[in-house]
Image (cartoon, grey):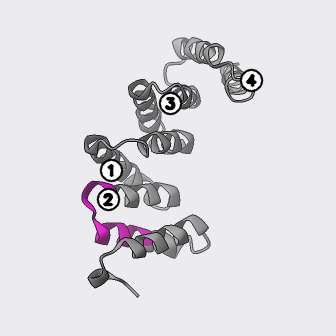
């Protein structure tokens, strides 16, 4: 069972620190099932952990594309890796990718939050970010991450743009 092999790879990597063994198991699965999103996403996380940024990014983007943004492990992995980057091109690519996924999943609070952050990072688009956060908060009013983000967002605005 390919999913059981992926689970074993996850345990080897996360619980036992056996990174290379886990990576080899995943590569074996991907030889049989090249579109196994869970394995691709996990491989991305392992590669990111090993600081193989370009390879990890390729895996995350493939998993996001194959799952049409439904695999939040891939989205989170991509996001966590992206946070370390100061490359504006990577942020612009992320914004495009997340925008496409957000149109397919307009109620995904995490996806919208990531997109709002990208808008702030790429173009300092305060209005765009504010609109996304308000929309997301209206459908997820108890989401503490969104409330904190909105408070931070308000604090980042220039004094003449403060919102009550």
Q: Can the viewer see residue 135?
A: no
Query: How much space separates mark 3 and mark 1, taking CA atoms?
Result: 20 Å
Q: Secondary structure at mark 3?
A: helix
- For image coordinates 41% across by 70% down, the residue present is 153
Residue 83, relative to residue 23: is it above or below? below
Q: Which mark is residue 16?
A: 4
Discs 3/1, front: 3
Residue 106, relative to residue 35: is it above or below? below
Query: How much space separates mark 3 and mark 2, taking CA atoms?
Result: 24 Å
Task: Left or right? Give the position of 83 relative to 39.
Answer: left
Task: Left or right? Give the position of 146 relative to 9.
Answer: left
**Residue 123 shown in magenta:** yes
Q: Quarter holding the C terminus?
A: bottom left
Image location (x, y in percent) of residue 4: 72, 23
Q: Secondary structure at mark 1?
A: helix
The residue where tag 3 is placed is: 48
Q: Earlier in the sequence, mark 4 or mark 3?
A: 4
């Amino acid at each position: 069972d390919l999913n059981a092999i992926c689970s074993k790879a996850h345990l080897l990597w996360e619980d036992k620190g056996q990174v290379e063994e886990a990576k080899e198991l995943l590569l074996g699965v991907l030889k049989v099932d090249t579109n196994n999103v869970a394995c691709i996403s996990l491989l991305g996380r392992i590669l990111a952990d090993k600081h193989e940024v370009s390879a990890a990014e390729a895996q995350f983007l493939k998993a996001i594309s194959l799952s049409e943004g439904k695999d939040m492990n891939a989205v989170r992995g991509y996001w966590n890796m992206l946070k370390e980057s100061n490359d504006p091109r990577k942020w612009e690519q992320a914004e495009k990718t997340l925008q496409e996924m957000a149109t397919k999943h307009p109620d995904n609070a995490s996806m919208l939050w990531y997109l709002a952050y990208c808008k702030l990072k790429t173009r300092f688009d305060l209005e765009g970010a504010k609109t996304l956060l308000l929309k997301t908060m209206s459908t997820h009013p108890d989401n503490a991450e969104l409330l904190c983000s909105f408070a931070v967002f308000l604090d980042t605005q220039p004094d003449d743009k403060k919102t009550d």
